[in-house]
Amino acid sequence: MRVLVVEDERDLADAIARGLRREGYAVDVSHAGDDALVKASAYPYDLVCLDLNLPGLDGREVCRRIRAQERRDGEAQPRILMLTARGGLNDRVEGLDDGADDYLVKPFELSELAARARALLRRPGEPANGQLRVGELELDPARHIATVGSTPLSLTPKEFSLLRYFMLRPGDALSEFELLTHVWDENANPLTRTVRVTVMTLRRKLAAAIAGAEQPIQTVPGVGYRLRADV
Amino acid sequence: MIPAPLRSARARLTILYSTLLFALAALVVGGLYLSLSLSLRDEPISQGAAIRATVPVNDGGEEVERTFVEAASFERRVNEHTLRNLRRFSVGALTGLFLISLAVGWVIAGRVLAPIARITAVAQEIQASELSRRIGLLGPDDELRRLADTFDSMLARLDEAFASQRRFVADASHELRTPLAIIQANLELALSEAAPSDASRAEAAVVIERALRRMTRLTDDLLALARLESPEIARETFPAHVLLEESRTEFASAAAAREIELESVAPAELELHGDREALRRALANLLDNALRYAPEGSRVTLSAASAGAGASITVADEGPGLDDMDRNRVFDRFWRADGSRDRNGGGSGLGLAIVKRIAEAHGGSVAVRSQPGAGATFAIELPLAKPEPRAA
């Protein structure tokens, strides 16, 4: 899950980014409206946390323009979570009317921001707390715990995010490019084998945990990888 | 103690009006009665026409002449009867007149006072939080209409004052929320880490300290602004070059740190008149801005000169300058130039608003001359020293 944090207060932007990264999101940060628009058109964000009060292009305008952007390859529009210090009714109504999906008034708790992010990114049929289950595999993003059977997996944040993305799309063949754009942030170098390496280490940890049973993450030749829906 | 029903202006007006009318009518009727009764008490008119009949009375065989005036006594009785009737009718008529005048007075007083009742009703409905209502009295442009219009314009001024107060509080809380959010988020991150490293703890502490310093600056400036709202400022006369030199010294190290040449120019004989502490603060805010935006190695000039009937203090920098739109907004509270938005290093956004308040408290003004790319010059114009009010 890839998130763009647009906030001109660097200290706050960094704190939000760190909080969301810990939840397993790939987070990019932007400090200005025009820069945010460039990033939003370049990467398929799942969620944009957008400060209303930005220098230059203000948050409402950014929100409208993101909504107006065409997404490639039938990617879904990002959800937009508006952050603002102004909590008046009019501000909230206008923000939502501009295309925001939710609204959070500063100062807020990071745990609430994370909960709202989970709620916004929840898909139909997904349990409310964001816990995922595919066969023997279980994953709780709020508590950052992944288990197979009853064996806990010790995963790095990146491996955790990768597993989460696989578990959101069980059975689907996912290309390396898709994994790179949704699970890694803009600092990932597309020319390195970072996706392949992380998939490999994740597989190794899964194999160790299930001890002999069939590897749940399969290679789809010429396409990428797939998490078996019936682990 | 006046009984409650009589305490209304309407009742009092009615009674006053009726009593006056009654008294006037009584005077007229009484006068009529009096003059009538006087004229009737005069010699009865029948006197002249008294029947002078000579009746032979046999009194010892001698004939004596006697005059009879019986008609006069008859007439007197008629007069008395008439006067009694007049009295009765007058009393009746006066009573009737009094009752009718009470009724008429009640109605008229009611009509005249109706607008006041309306003004009262609206004024009672208006709460402090809802000052948008107006009395809006219609009708002729008379005393009551003017009263209502005066109320309305007072309400409009209050409404504006409250609205600007509300905006100020909203802006201030908005400005405070951001550092609060930073503090909260960083504390949460630091506290939720299972085994926080010293480095991450130190980093959180630095960020939180920065946010706290910003909040302190902001609350200081808010307090300064609030204090400037009071109309009285201290006034003293002092040489301009001393003030400028003090300010220059205060910012010398800050300027040196950025290799900015800071100089002050003031004619030795120029005297300023006003609140020295406040003016020093205004200069400090201007210098703070100038040093923040001026590029390294440039020059910031602090100067004073007599200007027309007063004095002018200017702070000129060679920074990026301001365009037309920014020039108009630069004295607004919480406005900051875009591009200078790294607010942690910046001010509270109140600095120039404070300068403006200080200049206005002195009966002066502050203005900015600037072109994009050509630096900015802020000038505080102070009026000439007013003669000290002589102590009695």
Image: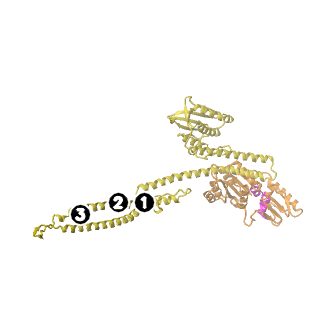
Subunit of mark 1? B
Amino acid, disc 1: Arg
**CA gap, disc 3 and disc 1:** 41 Å
Q: Are marks 3 and 1 in contact (CB under 8 Å)?
A: no
For the view shown, which residue lies furthest in the front direction?
B60
Tell which tag, 3 or 2, sits nearer the viewer. 3
Subunit of mark 3? B
Q: What tint does the image give chain A? A: orange
Chain for colour yellow: B
The residue under label 3 is B40
Q: Circle 1 — which element? A: helix
Q: In this view, does A89 lie above or below B300?
A: below
Amino acid, disc 3: Leu
**Which residue is nearer to you in this view: A95 or B372?**
A95
Residue A145's image quarter? bottom right
**Which residue is nearer to you in this view: B371 or B269?**
B269
Amino acid, disc 2: Ala
Describe residue A71's horizontal placement relative to residue B57 as left or right: right
Q: Give the range drawn in magenta.
A: A161-185
Percent position of residue A49, x then y = 69, 55
